[in-house]
Amino acid sequence: MKYFYYPGCSLEGTAREYDVSTRAVMRALDTELMELDDWTCCGASAGEAQSYLLSVALPARNLALAERTKIRADLLAPCSACYLNLRKVEDHVTRNERLLDVINEVLGMEGLHYGGGGGGIRVRHLLDVLSTDIGAQRIRERVKRKLTGLRIAPYYGCQCLRPYKDFDDPERPVSMEPLIEAMGAEIHPWSMGGRCCGAGLMTTKKDVALELVGDLLSAAEGADCIATVCPMCQMNLDSFQSSVPRRQGESSRISVLYLPQLLGLAFGLTEEDVKLKLNFAVTLPVRKKFSALSRE
Amino acid sequence: MPSNEAPKAFESPTPDSIPGIWEKVRACMQCGTCTGSCANSNGMDHTPRELWRMVQLGLKEEIFASRTFWLCSSCFICTLRCPRGLPLTETMGALKRLAVAEGFFADKKSPVFYRTFLDTIRRYGRVREMELMARYFLRLGNPLVPIAFTSLGMRLLSKGKISFQMPSLSSGGKLDALFSKVKELETRP
C-alpha cells in the first residue's frame, strides 16, 4: 500500500516525534509514504479567520501538487487540523459549483490545477488509515513486545471526528480501542475522547484552554498515558501540565504520547526510533515500563 | 460557461456580511443545544445561543463587542448536534472574518495572531514556529504575553523542537502570487 504523505508544519517543529514515529510505523507495516514535494501550509485556523477563499486555496494547492504527479493514491495527513482543511476543500467544491473555478484561477498563478477530488485522491487521517486500511489484525501480527500492564486513555480530539464522520462515531469514538488491545495494552474507559483540548486558544485565550486541559487530565487519572493523534492536542495536554491546577490526590503528571509512538514501541522499535525523548511529560513509572519491555 | 471566461465573484458558504450570516442562522429556534455542548461557553460573555439571537436581531455593535466568536475553537460539536442542522461553526468563522474586515473587535490578540500566522506562510510557505511567535509578540507590543510563554519556549528550544532561523531578507515571498490573487478575486465586484 502507498499513500501521499502531507506532514504539515507542526510535524517539522513541535511535533517532530509524531512525524518520525509515523514514518517508522508505516515502514514497519510495509506501507510506503510519498512525501508531497513542495507542500505548503494548509492555513490552519488562521486562514478561515481571514479569508474564506484563502482557507480553501491553501489546502487546494497541496491537493493539486498530488494530482500533478499522476499517481493515484490517497493522501495521508497525521495532523487533524491539516486533515480537516484538506478534507474541507474536497467537500466544498462539491457543494459550490463555482468554487472550483475560482480556486483554479488562484492556483493557475503557479501553473497548478485542482481537479476537485475526481482524480481519485482521497484525503485520509492517519487514524483512519491505521484502523480502516491496516486494521487491528495486521497490527497484532506485527507486535513484538506487548505493552502489557500499560493503561492507555484513547484521545481523539475534535477535528479528525467532526464535521466529517469519515471513520468513527463523532461523539463516542472507538476506532483506537482495537489498536490499543492489539498492542496488548489496557484501555482506560472515559467519555472524554472527543472532547476539545482548547486548540489554538492556548495561544490567544490561555485561561479558557487551561480549564479544558485540566478537565481532560483529571478524567485521565488512573491511566498511565494518553494516546493522541493530533499535534495540537498533544502539545496542549503535554506541555502545560504544570500550569493546570490539579485537585488534591491527583498525580501531577501523565504521559501524553502519539499513537504511532506507542505502536512503534510495541513493534520492537527503540525509544530513539520513536523520539520518546522529545515528549515533555513521560513519567517515571511509564519510563520504567518501557525499559522493562526492551529488556524482555 | 466557456472555459476562457474568468469566473466571477462567488458566494462563500457563509457570506461575510451580517445579512449573509443572518440567513445562515435565521432558522435557529433558540433551543440552546449549542450552548450546552460548547466546551468554551464558560469563558464567553454571551453564550452561543445568545449570539445567534443577536444575529437574528441584527445587533451588530453588540455582536462585535462580544468575545464569544473568538472563543470558538472549531470543535464542531454544536454543528454536529444542532437539531436544525445549521452550519454554526462555519458561521463563527464568518464572524471572525467580518470582524477583521471591519476592524471591529474587542480583543486584538486573536486577529493579530492570525494575521502574523498568515504573513509567515505567505513568506515561507510553511510555519516557522519560532519566528511566528516572535513576530506575534512584537506586534502585540505587550511584554506580559511573551512572559507567559517563556517557559514553554525555553523547553521547546532545549528539545530542539524549535530553532532560530534567519528571517528572509528578500521582499519576495513563497506564496505571494497565491495571496495576491486571492485578494484580487475577493475584491472583484
Image (spheres, rainbow, N blue to C red):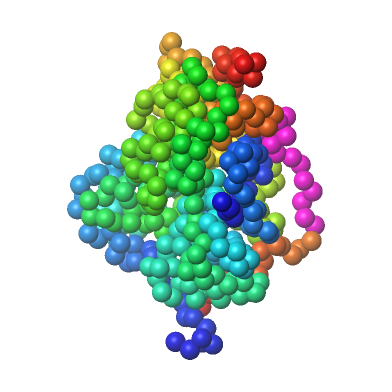
At which x and y percent is residue A104?
A: 55, 73
Relative to the observer, which residue lies in front, A99 or B12?
A: A99
Q: Is residue A200 left or right of residue B11?
A: right
At which x and y percent is residue B2?
A: 48, 89
At which x and y percent is residue B151?
A: 65, 28
Q: Image quadrant of residue A29?
A: top right
Give the residue displayed 35% in from the left and 58% down from the top.
Answer: B60
Position of B35 relative to A248 (above/below)? below
Task: Looking at this view, name the residue that lies furthest to the front.
Answer: A141
Relative to the observer, which residue lies in front, A7 or A253?
A: A7
Give the residue displayed 65% in from the left and 30% down from the top.
Answer: A269
User: What range is drawn magenta here?
Assistant: B151-169
Q: Does the magenta stretch include residue B155?
A: yes
Please say whether residue B15 is visible from this viewpoint: no
Give the residue displayed 52% in from the left and 40% down from the top.
Answer: A230
- Number of labels in the image equals 0
Give the residue displayed 68% in from the left and 32% down from the top.
Answer: A273
Position of B114 relative to A193 (above/below)? below
Position of B92 relative to A20 (above/below)? below
Task: Looking at this view, name the residue that lies furthest to the top.
Answer: A249
In the rendered image, the quadrant that contains the N terminus of chain B is: bottom left
Relative to the observer, which residue lies in front, A17 or B13?
A: A17
Q: In this view, does B4 lie to the left or right of A296?
A: left
Please say whether residue B52 is visible from this viewpoint: yes
Relative to the observer, which residue lies in front, A228 or B110?
A: A228
Position of A223 relative to A213 (above/below)? above
At which x and y percent is residue A286?
A: 56, 18
Q: Is residue A192 magenta?
A: no
